[in-house]
């Protein structure tokens, strides 16, 4: 629909525009509602009454959450797993993908298909759990980092990205006396910066959002991640999780609801902050996915 | 006599060829030593975390007891599978898995296609970009956040919709513990979270259409509807077919995180699926062998279906995924 159709909007256009606008509103409505309640002054908040605009604006719910030990500890744990996990993801994924690009490497095909097989067959939740248990990683944050160290899909996307890099630079570096490791660090890594940026976001979002592994491997609530805490606070209507953190009498009078909504907003916040980057890089990543040899 | 000499010579030459072949291979391996070094962490990861658990599948054929361990537990053959297949609840799990997938196929699958077609009709660039940004956003939220937002919309105490119902009719409705609504709610959650993001692949296919096709259609008097029908849809048909086949290949998969967050005792009968059952039986209740057997059944059927889907894709003259 390009240059030919540069005319006034028709009735059809208005219908289409309204449908899209309505869909956007459906996507945004839950956010607006949650953000608005989380910003309502707990003093004036009336439960069971629908109110989209706060009667009295206040950040008390946020201050309260950020003063509880359970929330701070979950935040700290999540940041730790996200940062350390993402660094390990990048190192393991990019160095392995580089090996997979080398056509002359003996055993490359075997490794390649062994990686792809994990994409189509998974032994299931229980064997994976037993392994982590056997390794003594239950209740260790390393369980979350190690079980998702890399994955077939990322390897294949990064490999196809590296395949598309110009071979001349690599040859030139070899003539200048670089060995394979030197080529990797001096040529491949600098050229892979766009892919590294994309995958930093991929891995970081995955670590930040992960719930499944935390649920299975972290049973001790002091090890919990943010998603675990939010689940307890919001879904199990867990007045207890915040209460446990030693609430003072005044704090205990805060209505649960504004705090629960504030907790979910804080869990989304980092995602919303990096969202402009996410959108740009992820769309590229999606289009790169292909398992072709 | 002559023959034997020739034969033994041939034998010798094969021998020397063989050794030289191994030597060449060894040389190649040594030559690539740094590549193996770089790949080592990844290879170890796959061996330890992706392949070692496959030994655990043996537990499905044993009466596993944590005290006796994997080796010490006695073999029982297919006992657990027979138990599973004769157990009524197994068919409940199968039904739930298939119903949730069929609902997603009917209600979710067309949404990204329709959305992409609608977005493609928008000529106002800023309006288009803003709306795209908004409908992509939910994809990046965790299932915990999505479940939390669902809760804040539908629950009887804090749900926005129930607050409205309460102020209009003085009554609330327990959406989240209603077993008639569970399938619909999880399907709608999936649509809300991922349908917008799903448009990307279709929009990319549409972007590849030659604009002169539309110009020619306009000259021929084709209205907008006919342009969509005769130009845009055929252009994305192959993408639709591939995604449809892949979707059919993953009919055994239901998102574990999504379901476990939405389950409560009142909707267990309609919401429990293979993964959640493996989790509750195999990990929470310690019935390890049944948990492994359920997971293995699901994994093998899933493997057959995805390979079948790939085979069919190739049959259709497409490239397939593998």
Image (cartoon, rainbow, N blue to C red):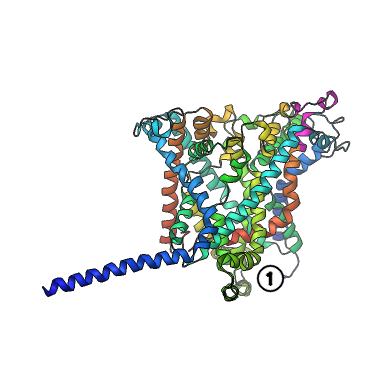
- The kind of secondary structure element at disc 1 is loop
From where the camera sits, is residue B121 visible? yes
| Residue furthest out toward the top | A249
From where the camera sits, is residue B196 visible? no
| Residue at figure coordinates x 60%, y 58% from the top left | A286
Q: Quadrant of the N terminus of chain B?
A: bottom left
| Residue at figure coordinates x 60%, y 68% from the top left | B208
Residue toward you, A33 or A3: A33
Q: Position of residue B77 (x, y in %)?
A: 34, 34
Q: Is residue A138 left or right of residue B165?
A: left
Q: Position of residue A249 (x, y in %)?
A: 84, 23
Question: Dot 1, crowdedness within 10 Å: few (<14), some or many (≥20)?
Answer: few
| Residue furthest out toward the left | B1
Queried whether the magenta region covers residue B20, the answer comes back as no
> Which residue is label 1 attached to?
A2
Determine the image quadrant of residue A68. Answer: top right
Q: Is residue A22 left or right of residue B43?
A: right
Q: Position of residue B258 (x, y in %)?
A: 60, 40
* Chief SS of the magenta region: helix
Q: Position of residue B156 (x, y in %)?
A: 70, 29
Q: Is residue A211 above or below residue B248?
A: above
> Which chain contains the residue that carries disc 1?
A
Residue toward you, A72 or B2: B2
Determine the image quadrant of residue A240. Answer: top right
Q: How many marks overall?
A: 1
Q: Read off the magenta span.
A: A242-262
Determine the image quadrant of residue B298. Answer: top left
Residue toward you, A256 or A175: A175
Residue toward you, B56 or A283: B56
């Amino acid at each position: 629909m390009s240059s030919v159709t540069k005319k006034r909007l028709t009735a059809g256009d208005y219908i289409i525009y309204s449908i899209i606008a309505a869909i956007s509103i459906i996507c945004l409505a839950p956010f607006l509602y949650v953000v608005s309640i989380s910003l309502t002054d707990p003093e004036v908040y009336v439960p069971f009454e629908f109110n989209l605009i706060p009667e009295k604006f206040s950040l008390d719910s946020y201050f309260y959450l950020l003063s509880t030990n359970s929330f701070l500890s979950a935040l700290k744990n999540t940041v730790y797993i996200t940062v350390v996990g993402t660094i390990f993801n990048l190192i393991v994924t990019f160095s392995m993908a580089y090996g997979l690009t080398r056509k002359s490497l003996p055993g490359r095909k075997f490794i390649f298909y062994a990686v792809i097989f994990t994409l189509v067959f998974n032994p299931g939740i229980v064997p994976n759990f037993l392994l982590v248990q056997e390794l003594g990683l239950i209740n260790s944050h390393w369980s979350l980092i190690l079980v998702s160290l890399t994955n077939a899909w990322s390897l294949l996307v990064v490999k196809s990205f590296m395949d598309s890099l110009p071979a001349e630079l690599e040859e030139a570096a070899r003539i200048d006396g670089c060995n394979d490791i030197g080529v990797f660090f001096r040529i491949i890594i600098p050229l892979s910066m766009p892919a590294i940026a994309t995958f930093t976001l991929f891995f970081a979002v995955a670590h930040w959002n992960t719930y499944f592994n935390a649920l299975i491997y972290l049973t001790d609530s002091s090890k919990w991640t943010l998603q675990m805490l939010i689940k307890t606070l919001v879904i199990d209507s867990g007045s207890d999780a915040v209460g446990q953190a030693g609430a003072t009498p005044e704090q205990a009078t805060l209505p649960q609801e504004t705090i629960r909504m504030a907790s979910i907003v804080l869990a989304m916040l980092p995602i919303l902050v990096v969202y402009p980057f996410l959108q740009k890089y992820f769309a590229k990543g999606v289009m790169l996915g292909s398992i072709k040899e | 006599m002559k023959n034997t000499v020739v034969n033994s010579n041939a034998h010798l030459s094969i021998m020397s060829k063989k050794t030289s072949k191994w030597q060449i291979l060894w040389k190649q391996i040594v030559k690539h030593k740094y590549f193996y070094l770089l790949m080592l962490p990844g290879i170890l990861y796959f061996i330890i975390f992706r392949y070692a658990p496959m030994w655990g599948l043996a537990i499905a054929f044993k009466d596993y007891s944590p005290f006796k361990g994997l080796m010490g537990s006695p073999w029982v053959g297919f006992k657990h599978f027979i138990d599973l297949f004769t157990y009524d609840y197994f068919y409940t799990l199968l039904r739930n898995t298939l119903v949730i997938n069929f609902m997603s196929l009917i209600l979710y699958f067309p949404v990204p296609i329709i959305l992409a077609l609608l977005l493609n009709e928008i000529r106002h660039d800023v309006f288009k970009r803003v709306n795209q940004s908004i409908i992509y956003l939910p994809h990046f939220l965790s299932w915990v956040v999505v479940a939390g937002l669902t809760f804040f919309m539908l629950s009887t105490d804090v749900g926005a919709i129930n607050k409205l119902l309460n102020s209009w009719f003085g009554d609330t409705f327990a959406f989240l513990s209603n077993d008639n609504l569970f399938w619909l709610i999880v399907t709608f959650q999936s649509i809300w979270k991922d349908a917008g993001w799903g448009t990307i692949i279709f929009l990319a296919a549409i972007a590849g259409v030659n604009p002169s096709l539309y110009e020619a259609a306009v000259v021929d008097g084709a209205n907008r509807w006919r342009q969509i029908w005769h130009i845009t849809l055929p252009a994305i048909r192959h993408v639709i077919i591939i995604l449809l086949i892949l979707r059919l290949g993953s009919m055994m998969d239901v998102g574990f995180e999504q379901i476990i967050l939405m389950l409560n005792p009142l909707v267990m009968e309609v919401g429990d699926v293979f993964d959640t059952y493996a989790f509750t039986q195999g990990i929470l209740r310690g019935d390890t062998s049944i948990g492994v057997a359920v997971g293995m059944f699901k994994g093998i059927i899933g493997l057959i279906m995805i390979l079948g889907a790939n085979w069919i894709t190739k049959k259709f003259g497409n490239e397939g995924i593998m």
